[in-house]
Each structure stands twice: as structure tokens, then as C-alpha cells.
Amino acid sequence: MKRVIFTGGTGKAGRHAVQHLLAKGYAVLNLDLKPLDLPGVNTLITDTSDSGAVFNALTTHFGFDGFDEGRPPRAPDAVVHFAAIPRVMIEPDNRTFVVNTVGTYNVIEAAMKLGVRKVIVASSETTYGVCFAEGDKDFHAFPLEEDYDSDPMDSYGLSKVVNEKTARAFAMRYGADIYALRIANVIEPHEYVNFPGYLANPLSRKRNAWSYIDARDLGEIVHLCLQKDGLGYQVFNAVNDTITADMPTAAFLAKYCPNTPITRPMGRDEAPLSNRKAREVLGFREAHPWQHYVKL
């Protein structure tokens, strides 16, 4: 059983991922500013922008039973870092950038210097530059894959690009596995009620590239990353398989993005934000396609 410290486990995406890891047999300690109401998981109130607090938190017992081991607490086997200001327009732009970039630096630095060699960090679909763009901006090309020229103009997306560079730097320096997940629009089970509206108004989903990640499938991607060793620094799109549209992908993109190049043949219903790398490298298989929950 791996001991995993999960930052931001109380958030929308984090709480589902933590529950999934717990079901897989991991021991999990949640670091967050708010407690997580999940039996079997303790929350240590931690501000990741405080480097000293992060170092301390990464060498803390997961629970009171840790005192029975007869030795001081040790660093975890892996760290999953989701803690962040989760989008723009929650706090001022400069605060969003500082909290997200400094927090990520602190978490990775502490993990590396304490001997942890597996870190999963939450990046974002916003790195592709359209989600929080000013005005109507087109994607450079489809499908959106991990070698895309990331060009966000907002503080949140920019913070995620910086975090990817931070992860790469530490992975090279320490010979560690640090995987960045470009997480698509996170959908919780109760949110599938919104999908008929998305299908009726296709352009409402352009900023999300007509793609999504079921919160439970995101937990599985995190699990697969924890199991997959030896890749060094990697970026994976964390996204479900299919486009959120009621017509095939090629026809849909020809209609709604006629001027955007298509760089390779795409599957009939492939999501424009492609998870091909996660499927081929990690072995990801979605369990929650939106069609299971939405009647056409």
C-alpha cells in the first residue's frame, strides 16, 4: 500500500480522486485549507504557499495510529498536488498567479528534498489558451495534444504553464517522475443534467474544446500515474474519450471550426482535447462516458 499525500483533496476534482485512491488501497493524507468529510482520510490544514508548512506537512503522521509505529513520521511514497486557486475571478489575478506557482514550487521542492520521487501535479486545459481568452479565439489545430504550443493570456492558465516548467526542472534535477495532468472541464455525477443544454448550444463548449473529464475517471488517471514508474517528466491530457456533441467529430469541427487545421485523422467521436497519450502510455480506459448518463 502506497502512502500518498494529496494536496487540495477537498476541492471539486480532489475529493473524487481521493475517494478513488482510498478505494484502491492507498493510505491518503489530505492537505487543504478546509477539511474533507471522508472517513479514513485526515486533513491537515496547510497553506501550500508557506514553504515551511509544506516541508512539515510532508513529514507528518497520516493519523493517530502513526504514533504506534515507534518512529518519527517519514515522507510519503508519492505526492499528488491539486491545491490551487481553481480558476480566474475568484481572487485577483496577481494573487491567483502567486498562489498557484509558489504553491507548486513549494510542494515539488519539499517532495524532492525529502526523497519523494513520484509527484503528480494538476495542470489544466486552460494551457491551450482558449478557455479564458479575451474574445473568440481559435485553437491552433486539432486534436489538442501534449506537444501543443501553449499560449494562455490569463493568470490562471499562465500559472499552469509555469507549473509545468517547474515540474520539468525538478524532474531533470532529481531524476524523478513528475507527471502533469492537463485536466479538462471536471464533471461530477450530478452535472450530467447540463449536457442536453451543451448539445443544444454547441458554441457554449468551445472554450472547453467540447471535451470533459468525469471526476471519477480523473481519479483513475491519478491512480494509473502513481502505478506507472520511470517516465521522468511527462504531460498527459486528463480527459474522457468522446466529444460532447451529437454528431461525429470531423463533421462537427468542419461546421464549427472550418478554419482550424486537423493534423491527423481523428476517431469518429474523438474528443478534440485528445487523451490518446493517456490511453497508450498509462492504459487509461474511461468508465464514465457521458452517453451513459444523457439520453439523446
Image (cartoon, rainbow, N blue to C red):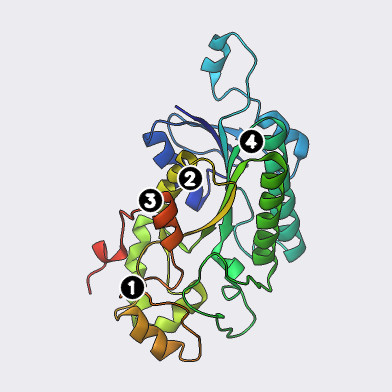
Q: Amino acid at mark 2?
A: Cys
Residue assigned mark 3: 283
* Viewer-side residue, 247 vs 263: 263
For numbered disc 4, what is the local secondary structure? strand
User: Label 3 vs label 2: CA separation?
Assistant: 10 Å
Q: Earlier in the sequence, mark 1 or mark 4?
A: 4
Q: Under tag 1, what secondary structure?
A: loop
At which x and y percent is residue 175? 66, 40
Q: In this figure, which residue is indicated by the disc labeled 1?
A: 267
Image quadrant in which the C terminus is located:
bottom left
Q: Residues within 10 Å of mark 1 (few under 14, many from 20)?
A: some
Whole-number angstrom distance, CA of label 4 to CA of label 2: 25 Å
Dots 4, 3 in contact, CB < 8 A:
no
Disc 4 designates what residue? 45
Q: Secondary structure at mark 3?
A: loop
Q: Is the C-beta separation of discs 3 and 2 under 8 Å?
A: no
Read off the residue under disc 2. Answer: 225
Q: Earlier in the sequence, mark 3 or mark 1?
A: 1
Quarter holding the N terminus is top left
Residue drawn at the location 34% of the way across and 82% of the way down = 200
Mark 4 or mark 3, which has the lower sequence index? 4
Residue at the extreme left of the image, as rendered: 295
Between residue 97 and residue 280, name the one nearer to us: 280
Q: Position of residue 183 (x, y in %)?
A: 51, 59
Q: Amino acid at mark 4?
A: Ile
Mark closer to the chain start, 4 or 2? 4
How far apart are labels 3 and 1 at the CA level? 18 Å
